[in-house]
Image (cartoon, rainbow, N blue to C red):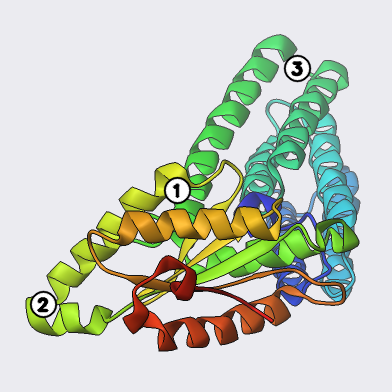
Amino acid sequence: MRVWDSLHSVQSGSDRESFRVASWWLSGIQLGAGVVSLLTITVGLEGQPSFQSYWFLAVGVSILGLVTAALRHRLEGVALNALLLASTVGVSYGVYLSKRTDPAILVIVFYSWVLLYAFSFLTRPAAMGQALAVAVGFGIAVSYGPDFTAPLGDWIFLSGTVIVTAMMVLRLVVKLSALSYTDQLTGLKNRRYLEEHLAEVMRAGSAVVGRCGLAIIDLDRFKAINDTHGHLKGDETLCSLAKLWTPVIRRGDVLARWGGDEFLLLMKDCTEEELRSAVLRLFELARPLLSVSAGCGVLRPGENHLDLIVRCDSALYLAKSRQDLGAAHDAVVFAS
């Protein structure tokens, strides 16, 4: 799944792993903030009694980090958002307690930690919500905190920092996400994206039974192209097919490079006849370059995406055995 979707669900193993990793990072941020705060109080402020409230706040944040780490296998999206919001409240309270001349105002830096985490692990709406919480929390803290002579100016400055931080992290995350889920040769989605996307589609349960179509498409005698004309010609053939096929794929459907000389077409809302027509169209477009074989199938009751892939793969073997016949109806076989 895309980075923004990593905390949408915990039904699959990969999603549970996403939550576990996100929980580890959040606990690390909370513990790090607590340790840094305690060091600031004991070393930077020499443990002055007047900073007793900071002691409690730093210890509280550290405990929150330990709790997050202990519950990392059970945390879900709502809980992670709530824990991050609690961290924001803690930082805002630290700002409220501080004075402009007090080194403790440096707790404002922890807002950046919160935002970096939010835009790296949460969904986009959730991350924007956390950014809004930072702006609101800081606004309340400086408005009611002592010795803030220009609360509006301080708030504008921090809000600007929030926006810049969000934009930079968003750009980085989107770029990394695209690289992670894109086949670098053809520009199509890759196998990793398709497997996670398929698992996500399957969560609709009975709603997609009979309406989710899959086709595994294999290039006939592709090895001969590599052996005769070189691998660069083979790469050129793969790219040419991707360019020919992409414009005829319906919006919302996914054409991906499954690996080597295999492609996979996922149609999320189709009948068997619509899937057949789409694959035959790809067959005809590929004909000037080479012939292709395809194993197709529509999701059945009780199946998951792995079952459907296995059925389509079996149908593909039958189609490959007929490749010498050269006709489209022989090259496109539906799984029994």
- Percent coordinates x, y for residue 50 in the rendering: 86, 42
Q: Quadrant of residue 188?
A: bottom left
Mark found first going from the N terminus, 1 or 3: 3
- Label 1 residue SS: helix
Q: Which numbered circle lies on residue 230?
A: 2
Task: Sort mark 2 into few (<14), some (14-19) or many (20+) by Cα contacts within 10 Å.
Answer: few
Q: Residue at x 85, y 66 (%)?
A: 68
- Label 3 residue SS: loop
Which amino acid type corresponds to the residue marked 2 in the rendered image?
Answer: Gly
Q: In the image, 301: left or right of 101?
A: right
184 or 70: nearer the eye? 184
Q: Which numbered circle lies on residue 238?
A: none
- Percent coordinates x, y for residue 1 in the rendering: 64, 60
Residue occupied by mark 3: 148
Residue occupied by mark 1: 175
- Percent coordinates x, y for residue 241 in the rendering: 31, 58
* Structural distance between the alpha carbons of marks 3 and 2: 71 Å
Mark found first going from the N terminus, 3 or 2: 3
Q: Residue at x 63, y 45 (%)?
A: 119
Against 199, residue 97 (above or below) is above
33 or 294: nearer the eye? 294
* Structural distance between the alpha carbons of marks 2 and 1: 32 Å
- Identify the image quadrant of the C terminus: bottom right
Q: Quadrant of residue 221?
A: bottom left
Mark found first going from the N terminus, 2 or 1: 1
* Structural distance between the alpha carbons of marks 1 and 3: 39 Å
Which amino acid type corresponds to the residue marked 3 in the rendered image?
Answer: Phe
